[in-house]
Image (spheres, helix red, strand yellow):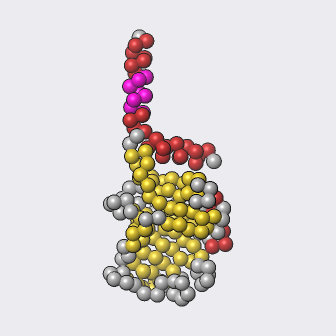
Amino acid sequence: MRRKVILSTSIIFLVLVTISLVPVHVFKIEALREGAVLYLERVTPGFRFSLGFMHSVEHCPVWDHIKIDDDYNMVTYATEFWSSRTGLPYAAFGNETFRAEGDHFIIENMHRIIPSINQWVNNKYDNKLRFGDGREFKLASLAGDTLLRMTIERIRLGNYLYHKVNQSIR
């Protein structure tokens, strides 16, 4: 009986260790100054999110729409903005399309690969993260007014689960 318990426990332990070593891709947000991982979200090709902020000069909203491609790159595929003056897009390039929709402008059919996104987050600029499923939150709620880096990374499932448990405890 004791041998069966030891054997069963050993098998369960080996299965759990093996599963924890499986690689997964995650959308990671970290505070650069503190070197702290603030947020992890498991991603697959086709995963979409948008980054929104209030433009500091024109004081209008801007939304960049990003998807994960088959090679796990972040790719900007569209941007929306409510003014087309200082520091904002004014034209489409290559195969991109520029159009007006109601009270704002949209550039679509973009394919701009982004290795990482470094963004100064400040409550007064209303920096937001919105996922394709509708979830949305203010980026300043993660660490206040600071410099954030967003990347797609390949990590072990065990590491991902560890960070998710720590996020839920905070």
Q: Quadrant of the N terminus?
A: top left
Magenta part of the chain: 9-16
Residue shown at 43%/44% (left/top)? 156
Q: Nearer the viewer, residue 9 or 48?
A: 9
Task: Give how far across and how far down residue 157 sits, in percent.
Answer: 43, 44
Q: Nearer the viewer, residue 11 or 135?
A: 11
Residue shown at 39%/69% (left/top)? 113
* Residue 90 seen in the current view: yes
How many numbered discs, if any? 0
Task: Give how far across and how far down residue 56 sits, in percent.
Answer: 61, 79
Task: Give how far across and how far down residue 43 sits, in percent.
Answer: 42, 55
Q: Main secondary structure of the magenta part?
A: helix
Q: Which image quarter: residue 122? A: bottom right
Compared across the picture, whether 12 is left or right of 140 comes to left
Residue shown at 61%/44% (left/top)? 169
Residue shown at 62%/70% (left/top)? 126
Instruction: Judge whether residue 42 is colored magenta.
Output: no
Compared across the picture, whether 150 is left or right of 96 comes to right
* Residue 142 seen in the current view: no
Q: Is residue 79 above or below residue 103?
A: above
Task: Give how far across and how far down residue 101 sits, in percent.
Answer: 46, 83
Q: Farthest residue toward the top? A: 1
Q: Nearer the viewer, residue 7 or 137?
A: 7
Q: Is residue 135 above or below residue 123?
A: above
